[in-house]
Amino acid sequence: MIVEFDAFDLINIAMYAERFHCVKVANQVPDVKKITTRYSSFAPHYLGAMGEFALRKGLGCSLDMTVTKLGSDIPDTIIKGWTAQIKTITYVGRDAEIPINSMEHFNAEILVGVKILNPLTCCILGYIHKGKFMEVHKVKDYSYGNRLMVGAEDLLPINTLPEKYKGIVPPTRARTTLIDPFDWLV
């Protein structure tokens, strides 16, 4: 699924990413030099925000926009009743892979891969259930240390994700409904 951003989207992405960046700077969290040597320390937050907003715009789901000092163990969003973690990549080759640092960092029921195609366009590559990820991942080190990788070819198209609670009421659980502070902008 291709998602194109307009100027308004890009402003919201930048504001969202800046919130993460400011919290990191205010709390003196050091940059991961391996990742930020080519970019400013703001860039990884901006790229991740692009992926999250692609899901918001493409699927109409809300985002958890909570900003914490060292990241969050709360899933990024809920899609059709499934908690979802969004991973954004910028790789331009044919064999795209979605990385996770460790299984402890896989904090949702599904992982959604998003690829940035250009500064205005993202492609939602698809999703994979946590159990399937555990079966098919490979451990690789591309000079960032060992990371768990799954190929984009292992992802299922996002439009095939079934409704988790079809015909039944979902269990009550904290954060089942995420609030989107940008709803008033629509």
Image (cartoon, rainbow, N blue to C red):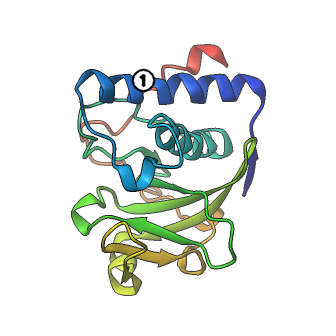
Query: Would you say 173 lies left or right of 176 here?
Result: left
Q: Which image quadrant for residue 99?
A: bottom left
Q: Identify which residue is drawn at 48% across, 44% down.
A: 44
- Evaluate whether residue 82 shows in this view: no
**Is 73 above or below relative to 174?**
below
x and y percentages locating residue 95 in the rendered image: 63, 79
Query: Would you say 70 lies left or right of 81 here?
Result: left
- Evaluate whether residue 122 shows in this view: yes
Q: Identify which residue is drawn at 34% across, 47% down.
A: 75
The amino acid beneath tag 1 is Arg
Query: Would you say 70 lies left or right of 112 here?
Result: left
Viewport quadrant of the N terminus: bottom right
x and y percentages locating residue 180 in the rendered image: 48, 26
x and y percentages locating residue 163 in the rendered image: 50, 58
Other residues around mark 1 within 10 Å, as few (<14) / some (14–19) / many (≥20): some
**Residue that numbered label 1 is attached to:** 19
- For the residue pair 173 and 43, the one nearer the viewer reads as 43
- For the residue pair 100 and 145, the one nearer the viewer reads as 145
**Is 118 above or below relative to 60?**
below
